Image (cartoon, rainbow, N blue to C red):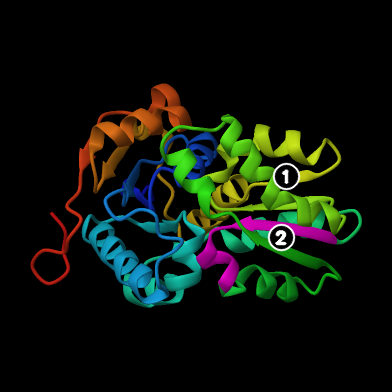
Amino acid sequence: MSDPRPIGVFDSGVGGLTVVRAIMDQLPQEPIVYVGDTARFPYGPKPVEEIRRYALEIADYLVHRDVKMLVVACNSIEVSAIDHIAMQAGIPVVGVIDPGTRTAVHVTRNERVGLIGTEATVASGAYERAVVATRAPVTLRSRACPVFVEHVERGDTTSDELRRAARGYLSPLMADGIDTLILGCTHYPLLSGLLQLELGPDVALVSSAEETAKDVYAGLVAGQLLREDQEGPARHEFLATGDPAAFERVAGVFLGPELTDVGAAQAQPVGGGSWS
């Protein structure tokens, strides 16, 4: 049976659209409702309890929109709240950490893998635990890169200031001899060109977006939740808790013509936790 309900995807801002792009490419028949919490961005420096509260509000909103699956397209949210979201949601929940880790462990040649992410993601140790869970003899070196998300959110992926920051963040990882780098934030794929330039061609960059989309596909198949192609083109909805126009300007870089009009979602809970 066909399930026409949308997939709910959410992030602190526009970064999760890298995951949306991959889902669209692999599952073009599936509609998506995306929420970017731009009013309360950035999440990375915030306390875990605050991130968790925001994440549960958004997840509750999407569940009340009758989505059939939740995709936590934000590393900071996943490390702070994915278990709580899964308990509350009552529908399948997919994250981004395990898919990226699996790929990096498979790709590395010298078993030295680097990770860059937000402060919350790196401090959580979630990727270290994910690597241990694979039982691969891989050493993980991590670096928090707090300015990257702010640059991407304002559409800067090439400035000299950003390149200098990248050089400072990456130098210790390069000194450790990594041959693979996990982009531990869904904003970072927009910096792939800059990062590759600084690291050199011999370091493989791993983005979890495509692997996460594969997990979404597998979850839909397992739950018999796929929408059939014959039901017509998928219609997507994009919502921002902050200024929709500002979101749309940057989001267009991620999705191009696939981006439809961006609506507004209220950034504070209404009536016992539901959003408007």
Pointer 2: residues within 10 angstroms few (<14), some, or many (20+)?
Answer: some
Of helix, strand and loop, which one carries label 1? strand
Amino acid type, residue under disc 2 in the picture: Arg
Q: Is residue 100 above or below residue 166?
A: below
Of 86 and 119, the residue lying toward us = 119
**Residue 139 percent location from the top left of the image:** 82, 68
The reply, left or right, for residue 142 in relation to residue 126 is right
**Residue appearing at x 21%, y 60% in the figure:** 64
Q: Is residue 233 magenta?
A: no
| Mark seen at residue 131 | none
Q: Nearer the viewer, mark 1 or mark 2?
A: 1
Mark on residue 205? 1
Tag on residue 102? 2
For the question of whether residue 243 can be seen, the reply is yes
Query: Is 261 left, or right, of 51 in this rendering?
Result: left
Q: Which secondary structure lies at badge 2?
A: helix
Look at the image and give the residue range highlighted in magenta: 112-123
